[in-house]
Image (spheres, rainbow, N blue to C red):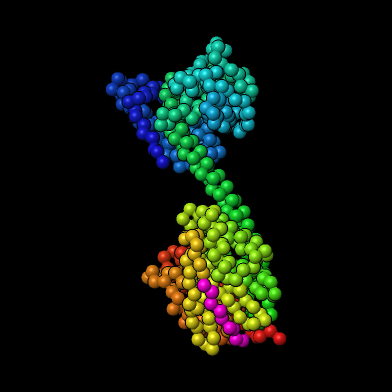
Amino acid sequence: METPRFDSSSCSFPADNSITGAAPQPSRSGGDTVAAHSLEQARVLSLLYDIGKELTSILDLEALMRAIGTHVKSLVDYDLFNVMTLSHDGQHLEHAFSLKFDERIDVKQTLPIGQGLCGAAVLERRPIRVDRVSEDPRYIQCEIAGAVQSELVVPLLTQGRVLGVLDLESLKPHAFTQQNEQMLAILASTAAIAIDNARLYDHLRRAEQRRKQDLDRAREVQQLLLPKEMPVVPGLEIAAAYLPAQELGGDFYDFLPYRDGKLAVVVGDVAGKGSAAALLASLGVGILREHAVHQPSPPGEMLADLNGHLQILGGNGRFIAMAFAVYDPVKSELSLASAGFPPPVLVRDRRACPVEVSGVPLGLLPDSTYEAVRLSLRPGDTLVFCSDGVHEQTNATEEEFGAERLVSRLADTCASQPAAQIVSGILGAIEDYAAGGPGREYIDDRTVVVLRFTAART
């Protein structure tokens, strides 16, 4: 934030205390008068400097305008006070803040640049002081001015730009002096910096509010893309959770009904985070849902087909890691293919083993093919899918949670727990692990999907 410097050589003040309104002092010798004048000048400049520091610390525009009006009033008496700022097109002055006898008023009137005393001050980039406005052809009466007799206008200049003007009006003629004009010019330079900063802050604040509103709406849409409830499939208990690292994330999961009572299970992770990743995730879910209805292909074919779609659309270097599985309740069998997604963990008889299945992430290479593996499930088997936000979460020493730690935990806890409890246990373990990390930050989205096979279909 720019802090103005006050140069005493550019301004001189009288020795008769006309600035502060103090009573006249007895006459002094020449040396005493010069000393008193210097002390008074230093005092006023110090006051202006203190006012400047206060103004440049205020970022709320309304509060800043009122503070400017209050401080100007303490230095130069007025009946009407206006802050007028340039319109967006730079062709008009608009009332930004107005006081009439210390009461806040709203003024809708605008003034073209070059017209009126205020417009002339902007055009000429210099203060204009008029002792009797009735004798100045440039004067244009404002809608709230009344019987104004004199006026003092000082342009607001900063970094070579004109922001507007400070406009003081009085119901008395000859109300403003040259010293008033000089003081107001100094104060105006500070006020211009403060107004410019406050307007920038206001612009950023409004932009942040719009961004937050957009993110809130996008988050709502993203939540709508996730299943509202777990599907009911004979012999299978299902639970899932998704926690984004930022407002929006690139992880997703879905359950798609297939023909003959089969169920497709999808877990994906778009490279990156934020709105771009969320958009690509939504696109992937949309394509899969359409294919599940019209072309319910085996897992490997489904991934290859989705990869082809992404190649056509172009992902600007982004790709999707995905696991795609189809569960057949009649055969108690699950067919699984992967496009770069972390291997799911199969827990059986208190032993946990990653399922070795791999493939190129979607969107990276054209004509990629994907091989599926088949798992014959037994009662009590549990299959756990975790996105890499689980594996790669770090602690205070920057050590990752890792696949081995996940496998060990699942072997210890999955024997008799329901699917929902397994999901919450994994996420709780990651939260505890991250608690010792720098700022307790999550480095990536966390998605967990658990399939627990309960019994063969009868």
Q: At which x and y percent is residue 273?
A: 50, 59
The residue lying at 60 percent from left, 25 percent from top is 110
Quarter of the image for the C terminus: give it: bottom right
x then y, percent, for residue 44? 39, 31
Whether 18 is drawn above or below 457: the answer is above
Q: Quadrant of residue 266?
A: bottom right
Front residue of 242/335: it is 335
**Nearer to me, 191 or 150:** 191
Q: Is residue 149 visible?
A: no
Residue 234 drawn in magenta:
no
Q: Quadrant of the N terminus?
A: top left
Q: Is residue 97 left or right of residue 181?
A: right
> Which residue does the image show at 47% across and 60% down from the upper left?
365
Q: Is residue 9 above or below residue 259?
A: above
Q: How many marks?
A: 0
| Viewer-proximal residue among 49 and 206 | 206
- Point out the residue furthest to the front here: 367
Q: Is residue 200 above or below residue 145?
A: below
What is the x, y in percent for residue 86? 53, 28
Q: Residue at x 60, y 51 (%)?
A: 213
Residue 378: within the magenta?
Answer: yes
Which residue is most to the right?
Answer: 458
Q: Is residue 88 visible?
A: yes
- Pinpoint residue 190: horizontal percent, then vertical percent: 43, 33
Magenta residues, start to end: 371-379
Residue drawn at the location 60% of the way across and 28% of the way down? 100
